Image (cartoon, rainbow, N blue to C red):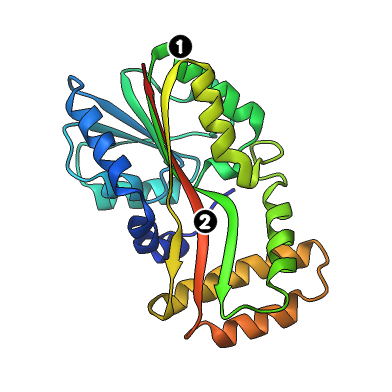
Amino acid sequence: MSFSTAWLDLRESADNAARDASMLADVRAFLAQQPDPVIVDLGSGTGSTLRAIGEVPARWRLVDHDPALLAEAARRSGPGVETVELDLTRTDDIPLDGAALVTASALFDLASAGWIDALADRLAASRTGLYAALSYDGVLEWSPADPDDATIRNAFNAHQRGEKGFGPALGPSGASHLAEAMRRRGYRVTIADSPWKLGPAETELQRALVTGIADAARELDVASADAWLRRRLAAASSAHCTVGHLDVLALPA
C-alpha cells in the first residue's frame, strides 16, 4: 500500500499536533541514554517521524518500499540519513543491525497479527525499542453529526480490516495487538491517545479524509456513501472532526 506525497504533506501538521507530547519526550530521553543510536523508521514516507522527533543524537535509517518517497525523504532530511528501499512484508529483511529504536507512524493499523508478531520477535531478539505513533483506533466522529455517520464509520472500520499488503489487517485493533505482543516479550509498554482534532482550519484535510472514507464505504456497497460524501464535503469548512489514534512506546525492560 502506498500514499502520495500530497496526502502525507496534508496530514503532517495534524499528525504533529496529535502525537502524545509526553511519549515523545520519553523517546528523546531514551535515545539520549544510548551510545550512538541508530533509528530505523518503517514506512518512512517523506520522513515525518524524523521531523517529529527532531534533533536527537542519532543516525536515521529510513525504510520504505516507494523509491519516490525515499528520494523525497532524502532531499528533505539532508546528508547523513540512510534510505533503504524494501518490501516491508519481508520482516526478516528489515535492517535492524545496530538499531536502538524502531519507529513508525500510521502503520500498525494496516498490519496483520502475523506481521506484527514476526516483527515483535525480531525486536525482542535484539532488545530494540519501538515507538509506533498514530495507529487508527476506530473512533471517527463529526460535529454537527450526520444521520449516516455511524453507518459510514462502521463500513470504514470493516474496510480497514481488509488486505492492505501485510495480510488481513487488524485495523482499529492493530495498536492494542502490538502493545500486548511487546508486553509478552518482556517490554515496558506505554499507550497514549493521539487523536486528530480537525476544525475549519483543516478544511482541505477534512475533504480528503471524507473522500477516502466514502471510497472505502462504496467498495463495501454502502448505498448511502455518495449522499453522505456530498453532505460532508459541503460541511467541511465549518465541521469539526475527531479521528482516534493510539501511540505505543515499547522499551526493553
Q: Residues within 10 Å of mark 1 (few under 14, many from 20)?
A: few
Residue 103 lies left or right of residue 176; in this view the side is: left
Q: Residue at x 46, y 15 (%)?
A: 186
Q: Number of labelled discs? A: 2
Work out which residue is located at the far top of the displayed protein and give it: 125
Describe the element under mark 2 as helix, strand or loop. Answer: strand
Query: Which of the two labelled residues, at mark 2 and mark 1, occupies the earlier sequence position?
Result: 1
In the image, residue 36 above or below residue 135: above
Name the residue tied to disc 1. Answer: 125
Q: Position of residue 15 (x, y in %)?
A: 39, 57
Q: Residue at x 68, y 63 (%)?
A: 153
Query: Which of the 4 image quarters holds residue 25?
Result: top left
Residue type of the residue flagged with mark 2: Gly
Q: Position of residue 58 (x, y in %)?
A: 21, 31
Residue type of the residue flagged with mark 1: Ala
Q: Name the residue nearer the viewer: 69 or 32.
A: 32
Name the residue tied to disc 2. Answer: 244
Q: Position of residue 193 (x, y in %)?
A: 44, 49
Query: Which of the 4 image quarters holds residue 85?
Result: top left
The reply to whether residue 47 is in sight is no
